[in-house]
Amino acid sequence: MTTSLRLLCSTAKLSREGRDTLWLLAALLVTVAPHLPRLPWWCASGVVLAMAWRAQLAWRDAPLPPRWVNWLALAACLALTWRTHHSLMGREAGITLVTVLAALKTLELRARRDALVITCLGFFLVLTQFLYSQSIVIAALMLLATLAWLSSLILAQRPIGRPSIWSAWRTACLSMLLGLPLMVMLFLFFPRFGPMWRLPGDAGPRTGLSDDMRLGHVAELALDDSIAMRVRFASAAPPPQKLYFRGPVLEQFDGQTWTQAPRDNTRMDTFPTEPEPHPNPSQLRDSVSYQASIEPSRLRSMALLDGTFQASPTPPLREPKLVRIGRNWLATQPLSERAQIDAKANWMASEEDMSLSNADRHRLLALPLGVNPRTMGWTRDFSAQSDLVSASADQKVLAVLRYIRQENFRYTLSPDADLPPGTPPSPHQIDRFWLDQRAGFCEHFASAMVVVLRNMGVPARIVTGYQGAEKNPFDDWLVVRNSDAHAWAEYWSDERGWVRVDPTAAVAPERIERPRRFDTRARNVDGALPGLDAAYWHTARAYLEAANHRWNMWVQSYSRQQQLALLEGWGVSEPDWQDLLRLSAAGLVLSSVVGGMWLWWQRPVRRQSPWQKRMWQLHKTLLPLTGEPPPQKPLPAPALAWARYIEGLRTDPTTQGLQRELIARLQELDRLRYAPSSHRSAQPTQKATQAEIRSIYKLVKSWQAHANAAPSRRADQAH
């Protein structure tokens, strides 16, 4: 408590400039904090040191460093930026430079102009955060930063006195609230013109799936806990063992990497005009309907539930355009934005009625020469068994699965951990896995399975995607993470078509090694935060992900198609972007009119005291007599000034008595205002003042009557 009081006392002793500088530094820290982990180490550390140095100077009201220090630091930062990014342009280099410039500018914060420059840089840095993430957490943090920058701007516009930060904060909040209706209106109706409303090509996140697979790639994804997609079923969800989300299919193998077979892209460059095949009655009878929200992946392959036979964008969306080729769904363009898909799948079925051409059969049996020779020899010996010589594809697959179960294969993310240090990579990775280590991740099992089956004369291929999902209890959506990435095999059966086989599932549960990261996560949380368990953080993460999903659906995914659908719901027939533009212009005009009226209503009005009102009444009474007011500024002139002015007027002898009486009344009126209270009349001042003004009015009328009668009297005397 003593320390807190001492800190408050020290803060109260800060100068106005020091306090405002510390507030500006706090706003800058909140703005750049999300950037610090992604900035180069020298930039992040330099920014923190510069801000800490400036905060110390503000706390002590010490003089700023000489300008040559800033110039030297700027030159060093430019050189380091060029060395790090090999350019001074682009997203990464640009954000690095803007962050550095904002931090260095604080070291020459001498005038209000410098504060305005830093504020402008701060607003720009707020925008750059959304190049990396548009989550609800970043949006809330940047809203807080925007309020901080607005309050700093308001403080800079109040140079006199010591206005409190709380008053500036309240004004900033009021400004945001006043602009909220206009912001909502523009969000709903301002037309989204093509690429202007999209982030740069390298700005969005992407999932870990790719068009190829090397051994170890999927294992790396197991440590990626980010969300790849969300799924919600219209009825009961399929059991977890049926949740295979089919992604890229890999058919070609060079001994190290699996890749997709060359495909005919003519069907994918334009939306197909021919209708998709109608599902058969059994598919419709056993099908399940679901909706998928797929994160950007930069791939054309859509990771939909295996067995999906109908898929289209969720109305009113029309993008992405989808094509079904065999059992796979692909977009006509790489998926660079979040996609909302409505689909139907027959998850009970595991086959597809289609023929396999000789060319496809030859391709799906091909293996690289001279690679994995020991596995090839083992396969020849294995298939020479009497029960496999004339066996069908299904029987051969069952035999290989029995071998995996019997030979104690292990499931692990680090199969090379048992190798001696310094062991060089092997060009025959399947040999090492299948015959030596017998430990690996799903891509090891799938790759070895396909190689063995092909060598046994069974056409086979690898399918990558996701397996399993986690239900979010707050919104009933199933969350599929990149850590759910999986690889399995498919083989061709002349009787059943393509059949899925997951060799990883043949591993006994007791031989599955969980990643250390997942095993110790809860224990680490419990140890780091006593009194809080991992279940609390799991619930908090589920709640945050549910809120973020709603943010994605309602805000980030709000598109031009939804804008037009909104107008259609209001009765506008065949709306287009021009209707949206007209509505936005009308909203801007209406907001401007309402804002102007509000400003007029809130204009500062100079209140007149009761005495000023009486003086204006006196002014209007005497002005017709004199023709002009006394040379007194500002108006209205006081009663004594009128008395002196009237005393200097040249009058007729017949009106001199009225002149003297009028001067006396004006002097009495002045005494009512300025005489001590003991000399004032017992009559209330306002009533006495009004009575004097009425007397003055009568005298003025009499004076004017005598002035008008004077010419006629002089004419009579002349005759």
Image (cartoon, rainbow, N blue to C red):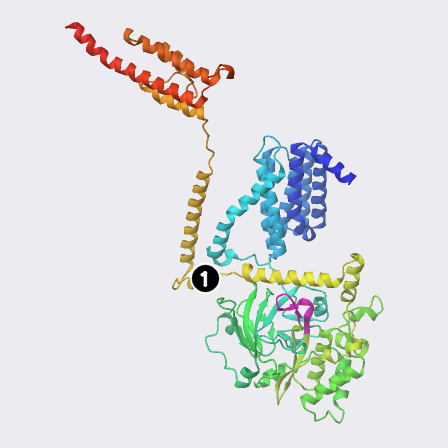
Q: Residue furthest front?
A: 682
Give the image quarter of residue 493.
bottom right
- Horizontally, residue 684 falls left or right of residue 443, namely left
Q: Tell me which segment is drawn in magenta.
A: 469-486
Is residue 78 in view from this perspective?
no
Q: Position of residue 78 (x, y in %)?
A: 66, 44
Q: Residue furthest right?
A: 420
Is residue 665 in view from this perspective?
yes
Q: Position of residue 583 (x, y in %)?
A: 42, 54
Give the image quarter of residue 123.
top right
Give the image quarter of residue 652.
top left
Q: Nearer the viewer, residue 466 or 469?
A: 469
Circle 1 residue = 566
Q: Position of residue 615 (x, y in %)?
A: 41, 22
Disc 1 secondary structure class = helix
Disc 1 marks a residue whose amino acid type is Leu
Asked if 593 appears above or below 400 in the picture, the reply is: above
Q: Quadrant of the C terminus?
A: top left
- Horizontally, residue 232 falls left or right of residue 670, namely right
**Residue at image point 70% right, 52% down:** 37
Asked if 677 appears above or below 327 in the picture, the reply is: above
Q: Nearer the viewer, residue 365 or 210?
A: 210
Residue 478, magenta (yes or no): yes
* Mark 1 residue crowding within 10 angstroms, few (<14) / some (14–19) / many (20+): some
